[in-house]
Image (cartoon, rainbow, N blue to C red):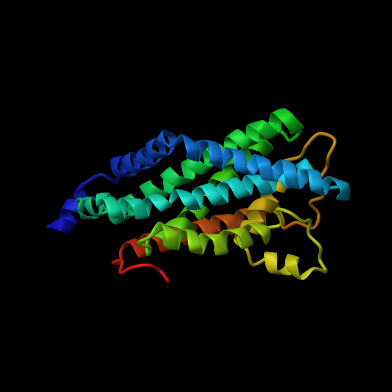
Amino acid sequence: MANSLAASVPAGPVVATLAQRELVRFFRQRNRVIGALVQPIMFWLLFSAGLRGNDLGHAFFFPGTLAMILLFTAIFATISIIEDRREGFLQSVLVAPAPRWAMVLGKILGGASIAMLQALLFLALGWLTLGITSSILAVLMAIGLMAVMAIALTSLGFLIAWRMNSTQGFHAIMSVFLLPMWLLSGSLFPDDAGSWLTVLSRFNPLTYGVAGLRHYLQFKDSIVATDALPSLPICWLVTFGFAAVMLVLSWKIAETRTTGDLL
């Protein structure tokens, strides 16, 4: 009976409603909106100023900052899963006659949309201040790649948050997990074939998203070398694969019962 009811309820409205709820919750918390945008700008200005003496500056650091916005915003948006469980909302959604995957997709699309909104604002800022010389098609392709990255990273956050009962535990794991993931993505330092960090970064799926953005985004009076980077087809293939695997794992873990914190 329950299965037939779930199958008869259209998934589209469920996905759209849950995604909209994530956006409404985000915009009602102005401190999240301001903090999530100010922090990357601060990092961008400080690090690029320090790297300018080594022939690296805003143009090199900009794609890495976009990746940082997507990474931190997308994953921390999934804290709402823990909050929804505490408030009882998640339990109501789980017993509703709707497919479980619709709930997963709605939460992930909501978090990914929040990350994309902030990344697009930052991209517009870079366009105005740095002068992006890439073609319109290249910029649109970069935005498409950012969207896939946002879905992949939000799914990763969902995967971790689903097994957590406390925001403290979530923050503890993220503080150890997120920063190394970003640092090993090539966001701060150029590729060096002889460096063990470069070799290690090739096992980080975020590396290929950052590399793809470097291919697409070029700036006035500053050309970033892309010869040593993974090719664009490889960047898309790895990023799409990362997103697909994380989505499937999120759906599978949502089918299981939670028993407590991951640790």
Most foreground residue, 60 or 152: 60
Residue 192 in the figure: left or right of residue 169: right
Q: Residue at x 37, y 38 (%)?
A: 20
Quarter of the figure with the N terminus = bottom left
Provide residue 184's location: percent of width, then percent of height: 67, 61
Most foreground residue, 227 or 178: 178
For residue 32, above or below residue 87: above
Q: Residue at x 41, y 69 (%)?
A: 262
Most foreground residue, 243 or 42: 42
Residue 126 in the figure: left or right of residue 93: right
For residue 104, above or below residue 200: above
Q: Decide if residue 216 is in sight here.
A: no
For residue 208, above or below residue 50: below
Residue 209 in the figure: left or right of residue 58: left
Q: Decide if residue 182 is in sight here.
A: yes
Q: Residue at x 59, y 46 (%)?
A: 69
The number of callouts visible is: 0
Residue 70 in the figure: left or right of residue 202: left
Quarter of the figure with the C terminus = bottom left
